Image (cartoon, rainbow, N blue to C red):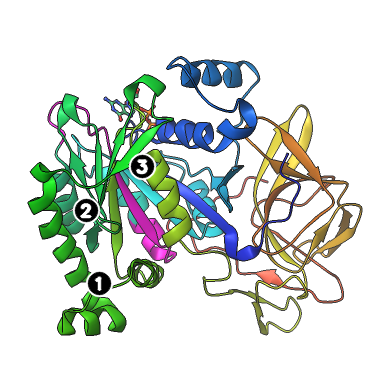
Amino acid sequence: MNTQKTKIENLRNIGIIAHIDAGKTTVTERILYYTGRSYKMGEVHDGQAVMDWMVDEQERGITITSAVTTCQWKNTEIQLIDTPGHVDFTIEVERSLRVLDGAVGVFCAVGGVEPQSEKVWRQADKYRVPKIAFVNKMDRIGADFFGTVDMIREKLKARPVLLQIPVGREETFTGVIDLVEMKQIVWDDETLGARFEITDIEDAYREDAELYRDRLMESLADVDDTIMEAYLAETPVETADIVKAIRGAVNRLALVPVLCGSALKNKGVQPLLDAVALYLPSPKDVPPIEGIHPDTGDVIRCEPKASGPLAALIFKVSIIEGRKLSFARVYSGRLMAGEEVYNPLRKQKEKISRILKMHANKRERVEEVGPGAIVGVVGLKDASTGETLCRASAPVALERMEFEEPVISIA
Ligand code: GDP
């Protein structure tokens, strides 16, 4: 059980955005498998393990479709926020985009960038959500990694930067060349991707690896002074400086790192998790959300500090087992079980009875959470989606969202 508190720097609130069928569910399942594996079942010795795990989880009512699922990857706590793939419910999509700090765009290597992904991607751009891209289904006939990258550039108007190139193609796709570390990663089919081997780049890929590494460094030199200086002086660059440059560029929305793999064949998911931890921002790295004082209309910046006044946004309300569960993201201050909170929109105080952290396989009761946390709250009777929880002594209403379509309220 993960009871230790994760430092805010090590928190990642992310969503997976994808066109239907691109592999969002499969990528999510693999993420939960690789992150949950250590406490679930230790080492995996046979290929049946992933499937068994999934069947097991389905029988227990796995909550991957829950508003948020928390998982642990090395020292990073990843909170996966469900972003609906369908675009009919624009409000629902926008609400979920509002509470995440970063996103992974999943694309099918055969279909490339399809209209639905364009729409969600643009919405994410509107909220200035930093993104990385994962080109999935590299094992399929007709998989075209570089073609998909071109589509990311042309259709999404993004500046993609390759962090990997594929090893093998279609049914012989076995792994990737990591252009940051200049290593080759090959997955073992027998253990369904639980084991992989990191080696030097084999001769057949050396030339391509060097070419694409140069391109990566050129792209980084454009956006980062340290890399530019080293590039001009032709001096070697430390891996840590490359990581820093990519992270900075992702945070400023200047670049979109691209990785690839095959979620179904269990290839590429662990480096994707590493990339989430390395390149996507923590709640501290994004600009603080602004709210308004409900009486004076003054703008209040809600800094991500535990010592600050409470500001939390309810972004989804579900009925689970007959009980109302409100999903809230804390932006500032502390949310505590047993405490009274103030809802400025309704001018009403309500009591929080329980706070739940949602994991793939269980709900963990916690006494208090701080900035960046996304939790299920039990006990709120009236509070609804889009409303703020704060203290009556320091009221703040987090900005109401602007919707593309008019909101029709049903009385
Ligand atoms: P979603 O609609 O985006 O959630 O997509 P799913 O994860 O449900 O995947 C859609 C279909 O593509 C399913 O039949 C998956 O088994 C299949 N799929 C997902 N990832 C891959 C992959 O990496 N390679 C191949 N060949 N099929 C995949």
Residue 291 image point, x, y percent: 64, 74
- The N terminus lies in quadrant: top right
Marks 2, 1: nearer the viewer: 1
Residue behind label 3 places its C-beta within 8 angstroms of ligand 1: yes
Which numbered disc, 3 or 2, marks the residue that appears first in the sequence?
3
Q: CA distance from mark 2 to mark 1?
A: 18 Å
The magenta segment: 122-143
Residue 381 badge: none
The residue pinned by badge 3 equals 18
Which numbered disc, 2 or 1, marks the residue that appears first in the sequence?
2
Badge 3 amino acid? Ala
Q: SS for tag 3?
A: strand
The residue pinned by badge 1 equals 220
Residue toward you, 77 or 396:
77
Residue 407 visible, this angle: no
Residue 402 image point, x, y percent: 50, 64
Identity of the residue drawn at 60% across and 36% down: 66
Quick check: 293 left or right of 126?
right
User: Is residue 182 shown above or below 138?
Assistant: below
Residue 293 visible, this angle: yes
Q: SS for tag 1?
A: helix
The residue pinned by badge 2 equals 152
Q: Residues within 10 Å of mark 2 (few under 14, many from 20)?
A: many
Which numbered disc, 3 or 1, marks the residue that appears first in the sequence?
3
Q: Where is residue 7, by image quadrant?
A: bottom right
Identity of the residue drawn at 79% across and 33% down: 323
